[in-house]
């Protein structure tokens, strides 16, 4: 049913919960796991010329570590895994990656928000992915991080 499953990560602890659901799905269909970390270009754009490059390098390193975690966990199950670290707006970049790589399913983590947090936030990455995806999205509600 699924040949390619995308598991975006932001490096937070939510990835453990996301992988607990996403990897069995990949295992069931012997799907390739795609790990993706997006360096949020809005964050790097808001920095000064002096701090921007250092922050971007730091976020890219964090991203490489985050996707390596997903790759390692997939490999432990004998699954093929590929990873990528990209720059952009997270939800948009996730959807662009999914389209470009013929992804069949996105498994993404989110964190539970209180009603007050929902009113004051602009929406989460996972919400934007669900709202705009043309393929199925499996949302794993977690305790930390925002997918």
Image: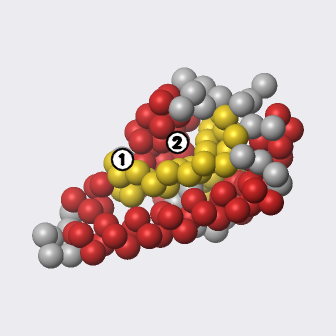
- Drawn side of residue 74 relative to residue 96, left or right: right
Disc 1: CA contacts within 10 A as few (<14), some (14-19) or many (>=20): some
What residue is shown at x 74% (from left), y 30% (from top)?
A: 2
- Drawn side of residue 15 relative to residue 130, left or right: right
- Drawn side of residue 15 relative to residue 8, left or right: right
- Residue located beneath label 2 in the image: 127
Residue 40 image point, x, y percent: 36, 56
SS class, disc 1: loop
Q: Give the residue at the far left of this rendering.
A: 49
Q: In this view, does 27 lie above or below 142?
A: above
Q: In this view, does 43 lie above or below 134?
A: below
Instruction: Identify the mark nearer the N-term, 1 or 2.
Output: 1
Disc 2: CA contacts within 10 A as few (<14), some (14-19) or many (>=20): some
Query: Which is nearer the eye, 97 or 123?
Result: 97
Q: Is residue 142 visible?
A: no
Q: In this view, does 86 lie above or below 94?
A: below
Query: Which is nearer the eye, 59 or 80?
Result: 80
Quadrant location of the C terminus? bottom right
SS class, disc 2: helix
Query: Which is nearer the eye, 17 or 123?
Result: 17
Residue 61 image point, x, y percent: 44, 70
Residue 32 image point, x, y percent: 70, 40
Residue 63 image point, x, y percent: 48, 63
- Residue located beneath label 1 in the image: 89
What residue is shown at x 81% (from left), y 38% (from top)?
A: 30
Spatial CA distance of label 1 from label 2 is: 14 Å
């Amino acid at each position: 049913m699924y040949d390619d499953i995308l598991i975006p990560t932001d490096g937070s602890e939510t990835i453990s919960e996301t992988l607990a659901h996403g990897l069995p799905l990949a295992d069931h269909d012997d799907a390739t796991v795609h790990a993706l970390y997006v360096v949020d270009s809005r964050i790097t754009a808001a920095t000064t010329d002096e701090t921007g490059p250092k922050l971007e390098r730091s976020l890219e390193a964090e991203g490489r570590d985050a996707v390596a975690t997903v790759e390692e966990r997939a490999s432990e199950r004998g699954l093929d895994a590929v990873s990528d670290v990209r720059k952009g707006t997270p939800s948009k970049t996730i959807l662009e990656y999914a389209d470009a790589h013929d992804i069949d399913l996105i498994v993404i983590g989110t964190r539970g928000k209180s009603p007050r947090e929902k009113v004051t936030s602009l929406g989460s990455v996972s919400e934007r992915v669900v709202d705009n995806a043309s393929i199925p999205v499996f949302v794993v509600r977690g305790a930390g991080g925002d997918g």
